[in-house]
Amino acid sequence: MNELQLINISKHFDQKIVLNEINFSVRKGELVSLLGPSGCGKTTLLKIIAGLLPPDGGQLLFDGNSILNIPVERRGTVMVFQDYLLFPHLNVWNNIGFGLRMAGKGREEQAKKINEMLELVELHGFEKKYPRELSGGQKQRVALARALAIEPKVLLLDEPFSNLDARLRESMRDFVCGLQKKLKITTILVTHDKEEALLSSDRIVLLLDGKVQQIGTPEEIYLMPKNREAANFLGKKNYLKGRIEKGIFYYSGGELKSEERADGTYWMMIRPEEIKLKKDKGNASAIIVDMRFAGDRIYYKVKLGEEMLECLMLPDTIFSIGEAVNLSMDLQNIILFPE
Amino acid sequence: MRERKWVQEILLYSIVFLLTLPIFILLIWSFTKTWPWPDLIPKDVGLRGWRYIIDPHTKILKILCFSFFLSLAVTFVTLLVSLPAAKAIGQHNFKGKKAIQIFILSPIIVPPLAVAMGIHVKFIQMGLADTFWGILLVHLIPCIPYAVRILTNVYEALGTRMEQQARILGANRLQTQFHVMLPLLAPGLVSAGSLVFIISFSQYFLTYLVGGGKIITLSMVLFPFIESGDRAIASALSLIFIAITLIFFLLINKILRTHLNTQDYFYL
Ligand SMILES: Nc1ncnc2c1ncn2[C@@H]1O[C@H](COP(=O)(O)OP(=O)(O)O)[C@@H](O)[C@H]1O
Ligand SMILES: [Mg+2]
């Protein structure tokens, strides 16, 4: 069931349109990622949902009722900012209890909830510490506990892991996702990191240039991109130009059956991981132009006739630059985009 | 590295010495009867300067208390008026902001003498001349520009994000200002408050004009002694003067620190 619904939400700053008729919904207990490059309006959208910014137009529904006129402090959505924004004059205990205190909850009720939160984010023993004495990951957990303490209906996370170093980021991501599953709290996670979105979301909303490009599960978003922009944002892709004539796609490397499509010019998309390179057995068709070793994988640039292809291989066989190789493509998941 | 530190320390102590030297001289002067050149240390010591201050006939202690509370009230009212103004200027953009900024700062640029006469006439018409409230109001003129200036910078540095965070966590506007912004502003309030207190406390001309000689503050008592060259009394009064401002600074600092638990930084 859809809990939070965005209908035609738009926003502009000075002449610039930042959000252009955004539509999507979030189901109860679901974790939806808002994925898009920096500056595409992700933070702006979260602020609109939280009530910090009014949209120019559109509707925002919670359980079918508009919440646009409910002020920030009573909206029941809580946002955790990228840089945590812990109150520097309050210790961990009082930071976590801030929302409860503002709501006028009794001392005992506060203490019970704060202890519960400390347990949840595994920060017992840190009650007396001030934000300046905490590490990045600890600050993050305090910010999370502070947000969860007021039992929000919707949790909004704005690039929560981008200020952490690589290893901490992974463990915090698992921690937060685990917490989300455990509490079944409706969550929107904003990120510009495709891997983060793919790994942690139930569904992804892909936002490019202020427009929703695609909505779907991580598998759908990665395997069935709707257009080239969406495909490119999720990683480097190869495109081969060709034509469909009477249900057959003809391209420089051969031909393919493609019965549902109308005749015309198309781009065939092949992911780097769908290209396989093999040792030359005398009939080599391609030449390695560039090779970059990344440990658990190797990136190759391969020249095939006129075309330059990106290719991703496991480091089981290593080819050197200039070597002639046999090239085969896995054509099962081929996607054609009309020109 | 070591040598640099050495040089730094010498420099630091020299500066402290140079800054405190006048206070020592004042201290010596306040205990002398005469101190003719070229004596390095005065031969005639006495308590005349201090006795004058304690003497109930001179009413110095009473004036001192009055001055202290007057400046305290001025400081309080100045901060109260300056906070919203500084917030508006520091956090928001609006039409005519530059003009308003210049208008608020104008008492620093235009000498108060130029406007004080007109104000005095108006105050007489309104029955504010020669009254405590008249003096309080006229002291706001040189005080508000400095307070607004300092607090604007503080608001600019703080931005609006902490406020947004507080609102998101369920604090209403009033709670946000009181529980989040006030503690964050505290160091700025100490800086602005101390400066405003000193400006008000050492105000001579405006008090003299609007008070019509009926309302006496410490600086008005002090001036004639400096003028007539009675150094013993002038020095004793000056020391009291310095002590009061220092006490005020420590007091406001202590109060804001313990109640609001802010960190060690000042906006000076
Ligand atoms: N208050 C504002 N005034 C003017 N422009 C803004 C404001 N906030 C954001 N923008 C602009 O809107 C665009 C989107 O910003 P933002 O939502 O922060 O992007 P993201 O979070 O996706 O990186 C940016 O180009 C930014 O410069
Ligand atoms: Mg952002």
Image (cartoon, coloured by chain):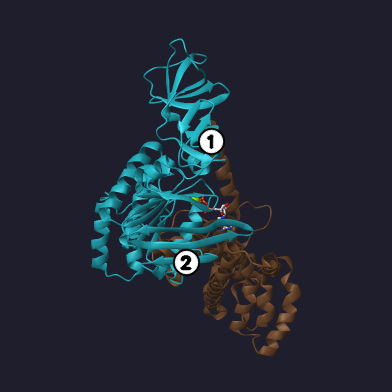
Q: Position of residue A6 (x, y in %)?
A: 44, 62
Chain A palette colour: cyan
Residue occupying image coordinates x 55% and y 65%? A56
User: In the image, is A161 to the left or to the right of A10?
Assistant: left
Residue B240: quarter of image: bottom right
Callout 1: SS: strand
Tell me if I can see residue B40 in this picture.
yes
Q: Position of residue A142 (x, y in %)?
A: 34, 53
The residue beneath circle 2 is A59
The chain holding disc 2 is A
- Pointer 1 local density, CA inside 10 Å: few below 14, some 14–19, many at least 20: some
Residue A241: quarter of image: top right
Mark 2 or mark 1: name the one nearer the start of the chain.
Answer: 2
User: In the image, is B77 to the left or to the right of A157?
Assistant: right
Q: Position of residue A76 (x, y in %)?
A: 37, 65
- Pointer 2 local density, CA inside 10 Å: few below 14, some 14–19, many at least 20: some
User: In the image, is B129 to the left or to the right of A215?
Assistant: right
Q: Could you say which disc has been placed on residue A245 in the image?
A: 1
Residue flagged by tag 1: what amino acid is it? Glu
> Which chain is assigned brown?
B
- C-alpha gap between disc 2 and disc 1: 45 Å
Residue occupying image coordinates x 33% and y 60%? A94
The chain holding disc 1 is A
Say if labels 2 and 1 share a chain.
Answer: yes
In the image as oriented, which residue stretches furthest toward the front?
A246
Q: Foreground: B220 or B198?
A: B198
Q: Could you say which disc has been placed on residue B17 in the image?
A: none
Comparing labels 2 and 1, the label whose residue is closer to the camera: 1
Residue flagged by tag 2: what amino acid is it? Gln
